[in-house]
Structure formats: structure tokens, C-alpha cells
Image (tube, grey):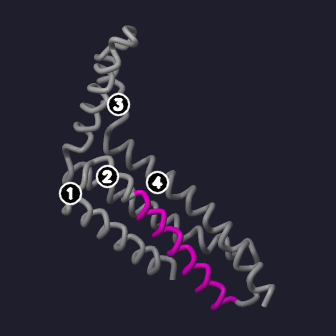
Amino acid sequence: MYFKIAGYMTVTAIAAKLFLYLIGPGQEEMAMYTMFVNLLVVLVGTFFTVRQYRIKNPQSGFNSEFKAGMRSAAIFAVLMSVFVLVYYSYIDTHYFEKMIDSRIELAKSSLPDNPDIKIDEVRKTGELFFTPRVHATITLFGLTATGAIYSFLLVLLTRKIYRLN
């Protein structure tokens, strides 16, 4: 059950990411839309996992439902991290170069106001931070944390709603 739902979640998120890449909005807008799609996919996938788990185990407790929601979210996070690593390494290879260049331009434009900025340090910091591996790691931790929060809130809310009925 967990792999099936996580698989659907991953296919949906990958399709959205590739669709946004093909229609070609700006790099900042694409990142924002992709983030929103991923948050929605985690929310919906976690909800359906908790729902399916509750249908199969009607006498389940809070902890077991929370763990069920987290399992699919964690599997999704791992799969998306692998995809992000592959995507930025082989498909959109110039994304991070553009991000570094935009940070350097921003630093150059603020040089008159702040003469202490060193462009070489900005470039080195950008090259250290803007890599596919770092982005994949941030994706892994971010989606896992989001899945934990969503799982907790969904189990809490659905248990309250079912108790009211």
C-alpha cells in the first residue's frame, strides 16, 4: 500500500516538474510552483495513506496511523530526492549556473552600498551551495519534515472528525 501510493505521488510530482520545465517559466517561478506541487502531493498522498490504513485497520491507534502516513511520505521523499539529483545533473544542467550568476549580479549591484562584499567569495559560496547533491539533500529533509507534519495534523484532524460523527 505504501509503495503504491508513494509511487503515484512520485509520478505526479515528476510529471508536474517536467511539465513546468517544458512550458518554461522563469527559474524562480518554476521553483516556486514545483514546491507548491510537491507540498500538495505530500498532503494528498499522506491523506490517502492514512485513510487506506484506517479502512484496513479500523481499531488502529494514533501512533500506527501517524507511522502509516509517514511511511508513504518518506518513500516519496527518497524517490523525489533521487529524481532531483538526476534532474539537475542531466536534464536542467544550467539551473544552478543561472542561480550563481544571479547571486553574483545581485552582489555586484549592491557593491556601491556595501564595499565589503567580495565577488569571489559570493561565487565560492554559490558553487558550494548550488549543487544537485545539496539540493537533493534539502529536498529529502524538507519533504520528510513536511510529511511528518502533515501526517500528524491529518491523523489528529481525522480522528477528531470521526469522533464527532
Q: Secondary structure at mark 2?
A: helix
Residue 150 in magenta stretch: no
* Count of number-bearing discs: 4
Q: Who's the residue at 23% across and 59% down the image?
A: 21
Mark 1, residue position: 24
**Cα distance, mark 3 to mark 2?**
15 Å
Mark 2, residue position: 85
Q: Are the two marked residues, 3 and 4, in contact with CB atoms closer than 8 angstroms?
A: no
Mark 4, residue position: 140
Q: Who's the residue at 21% across and 51% down the image?
A: 92
Q: Is residue 149 left or right of residue 132?
A: right
Look at discs 1 and 3 and give the one toward the viewer.
1
- Please rate how many residues cluster around mark 4, counting C-alpha atoms within 10 Å: few if below 14, some from 14 to 19, many from 20: many
Query: Given the image, on which type of amino acid does mark 3 rest?
Result: Leu
Q: Are the two marked residues, 1 and 2, in contact with CB atoms closer than 8 angstroms?
A: no
Mark 3, residue position: 128
**Residue 95 at x, y percent in the picture:** 24, 44
Look at discs 1 and 2 and give the one toward the viewer.
1
Circle nearer the N terminus (4, 2) = 2
